Each structure stands twice: as C-alpha cells, then as structure tokens.
C-alpha cells in the first residue's frame, strides 16, 4: 500500500486569520516556540485504543495553559488528549487536525495528519518474520510482549520474532535485539574483542570481523547465522534516547549537530539492513515523550539532567526523525508515531524519567501493532 508521507511541524498564522485582531510580539514568540508537531500518519485498528496526548506534540512546560481543539470525524477530545477506539465501520483514512489557542481563544498554531484505520483482519493467514532493534525500552521486553499479544489475537498473521536476546521477562516466542544504553552508532559500529557475556561489553549483533581482520557491519551474516538465512519481513527501530540524552539542551545548534550524527549512523544501519532484507518494511519509532514530572528526572539524574532539557532535545529529535524519513521518499521506510500514544503522566512511574510503566509500554506496543497492520 502506498502511503504519501507529509510532515507538518507547525503553522504560523497571519493576523487576518486570528480572531482578536493584531498579533502581538508575545503571541508571535509563543507561536514559534510551541512547535506543534504531528507525524504524517496516525495508525489505529478496530478495538484498540489510540491517543494523541497534547503535551507530546508541543514544546512547552505548561500545556495546561493552552486549548487544544481536534478536528476529526472519529474519537473525542478530552482534557489532556484526543482518544479513539475505532470500530470496523471506521476503516479507512480520516483527516485529523489540531488547533492550539491561548486561554483567550487566540489561535496560535495548527497541524494536520491522517488517521489510518486498518482492517482488523489485515494480514490474516499470512506468515511474518519480525525483528525489533532498540535500547533499554526494548530490553525491558514489555512492549515487544504487547506486540506479540496483539498479534496472537484472531484476524492476524502467524508471527516469528527474530533476535538473539530473550530475557526471562519475554513471553513465549518473543525475542529482539534490545540492550540498555545502546545507540544507533553502537549497533552500526561496536566490536568488542573481549566480551564478558553481558550486554554492556559485547559486540553489536550485526558487526563481525571481516576477512581483513577489521570489524565491519554485516547484517547479511547475522541473518545467515542467527535467522536461519531467512530475512525479516519487518524491522522496527526504537532508538534515539541514548544517542541524544546528553546533547546540550540550551544550544539548538548543538542539538542539531548531535542529531546529524545520529541520522548518519541510522542511514548506515538501514542501508545494510536493506541489503540483507531487500523486501522488508522498516519502521522508525519516534522517540517517546518523557515523563511529565521533573521529580522523576531528579530521582534518576539528580541535577545533571532535567525534564525540560530532555523535552527540548526529544521534541527536536522527533522533528528531525520525521523530516529524515520523509526526505527518503521510500514506501518501505516509514514513521511509527510512538511519541503520540504514550501518556506522559499515567504512562510513567513517579520515579523514572524515560522508562514507562506497564500502561505506557502497552501504549508503545499498540502503536507498533497498528503500524504493522497498516503495512499488511
């Protein structure tokens, strides 16, 4: 299925379009600072809840200070989110737009996307091979378990998860390549000549010594040796936090420079995966929005990193991820809008800034599941 990729980051509105007359300098500053950002597609499956949490789509410390109006023929707008549980009759593509206003009703920004409701039986009776590559969010194995649970319900393909990592928390059949602290760069380049058997001191599963004795990225060899020479049909990447967490939050140019490096490593890894799995669909998960509580960051990082610092980095990373995938113009590489569907309050414990609780991990799994169904 061909899906046109289009990204809307934010729209600055002229005075003629804004109720209340002339835009003040303060209005214009807020308008630009909000950076309302939506991915081109939001995926949903009948019977499975999908959400857009407003805090996750704007760059502000005070989302409660703004009014969010969602225009969509499905779902409903609540205080902190727009939410939908589609029905079978809703299958199809539905326009979705968000308008952000101040408390006085002055329109500040708009952005649009498309809600793609996928048939519940999409991919039924097919056989798929799925690989998930990620950091500690994947290592926890909770969202891969949720993907497996949803795929095991009626109306789905039979599935095999590929990967060498099967933690004790993994449900039956669940495997992945997810390791705490790992990055795009580490998966593309890391070679450890003296591994100690832990995930911290080991080579990337995709990097081997070449005939010249030098480390090289070789996903084909990985597929041959670890996947019975059968390449995956779907590869999902959930990376970005560790690549960018320590970027200079007060320096936009420094953030972009760090993200430039991330994108280059991502291109390298994707290119080698493409050689090994030429017919696969690749999904790039948008880096999830953080816990809304500064206290959670204080519990984890003391005074080294703040919630607002990571929020600024994460928001820019999401924008660049969307831009990079859109620029590829490749039907087989698409965005998974995982940052929309995670509750920044109830989806996190009170004492962890970036690692969700069970509810948050389940929301990540639902987003990935809906994307998979859309590609089927």
Image: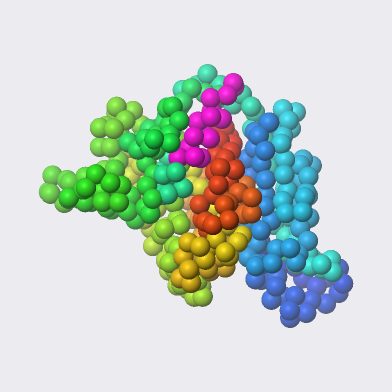
Residue 171: image location, x then y, percent: 45, 30
Residue 290 against residue 168 in the figure, above or below = below
Residue beneath the point at 75% across and 66% down: 65
Looking at the rendered image, the quarter that the C terminus falls into is: top right
Viewer-closest of 331 and 41: 41
Residue beneath the point at 43% across and 67% down: 246
Residue beneath the point at 62% across and 54% down: 344
Residue 178 against residue 318 in the figure, above or below = above
Residue 43: image location, x then y, percent: 62, 40
Query: What's the coloring here?
Result: rainbow
Q: Which residues are magenta?
A: 141-155
Residue 258: image location, x then y, percent: 42, 66
Examine the structure image and report whether residue 169 is included in the region drawn in magenta: no
Query: Which secondary structure type mostly characterizes the magenta part of the structure?
Result: helix
Residue 62 against residue 216 in the figure, above or below = below
Residue 98 vs residue 291: left or right?
right
Residue 162: image location, x then y, percent: 38, 32
Viewer-closest of 140 and 155: 140
**Can residue 8 be seen here?**
no
Q: Quadrant of residue 336?
A: top right
**Can residue 144 be seen here?**
yes
Viewer-closest of 277 and 146: 146
Looking at the rendered image, the quarter that the N terminus falls into is: top right
> Farthest residue toward the top?
125
Residue 350 vs residue 284: left or right?
right
């Amino acid at each position: 299925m061909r899906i046109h990729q289009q990204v809307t980051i934010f729209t600055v509105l002229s005075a003629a379009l804004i109720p209340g007359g002339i835009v003040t300098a303060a209005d214009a500053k807020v308008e630009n600072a909000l950076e309302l950002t939506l991915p081109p597609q939001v995926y949903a499956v009948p019977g499975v809840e999908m959400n857009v949490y407003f805090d996750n789509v704007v760059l502000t410390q005070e989302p409660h200070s703004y009014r969010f109006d969602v225009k969509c023929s499905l779902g409903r707008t609540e205080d902190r989110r727009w939410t939908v549980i589609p029905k079978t009759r809703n299958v199809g593509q539905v326009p979705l737009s968000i308008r952000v206003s101040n408390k006085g009703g002055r329109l500040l920004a708009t952005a649009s996307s498309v809600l793609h409701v996928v048939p519940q039986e999409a991919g039924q009776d097919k056989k798929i091979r799925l690989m998930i590559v990620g950091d500690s969010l994947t290592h926890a194995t909770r969202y891969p378990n949720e993907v497996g649970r949803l795929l095991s319900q009626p109306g789905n393909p039979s599935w095999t998860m590929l990967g060498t990592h099967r933690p004790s928390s993994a449900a039956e059949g669940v495997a992945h390549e997810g390791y705490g602290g790992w990055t795009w760069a580490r998966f593309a380049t890391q070679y450890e000549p003296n591994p100690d058997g832990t995930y911290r001191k080991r080579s990337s599963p995709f990097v081997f010594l070449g005939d010249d004795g030098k480390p090289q990225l070789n996903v084909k060899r990985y597929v041959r040796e670890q996947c019975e020479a059968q390449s995956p049909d779907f590869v999902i990447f959930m990376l970005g936090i560790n690549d960018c967490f320590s970027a200079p939050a007060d320096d936009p140019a420094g953030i972009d420079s760090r993200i430039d490096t991330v994108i280059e490593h991502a291109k390298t890894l994707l290119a080698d995966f493409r050689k090994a799995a030429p017919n696969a669909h690749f999904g790039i998960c948008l880096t999830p929005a953080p816990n809304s509580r500064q206290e959670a960051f204080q519990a984890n990082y003391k005074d080294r990193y703040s919630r607002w610092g990571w929020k600024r980095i994460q928001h820019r990373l999401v924008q660049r991820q969307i831009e990079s995938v859109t620029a590829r113009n490749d039907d087989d590489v698409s965005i998974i809008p995982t940052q929309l569907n995670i509750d920044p309050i109830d989806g996190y414990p009170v004492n962890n800034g970036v690692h969700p609780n069970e509810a948050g991990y389940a929301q990540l799994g639902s987003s990935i599941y809906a994307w998979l169904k859309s590609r089927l």
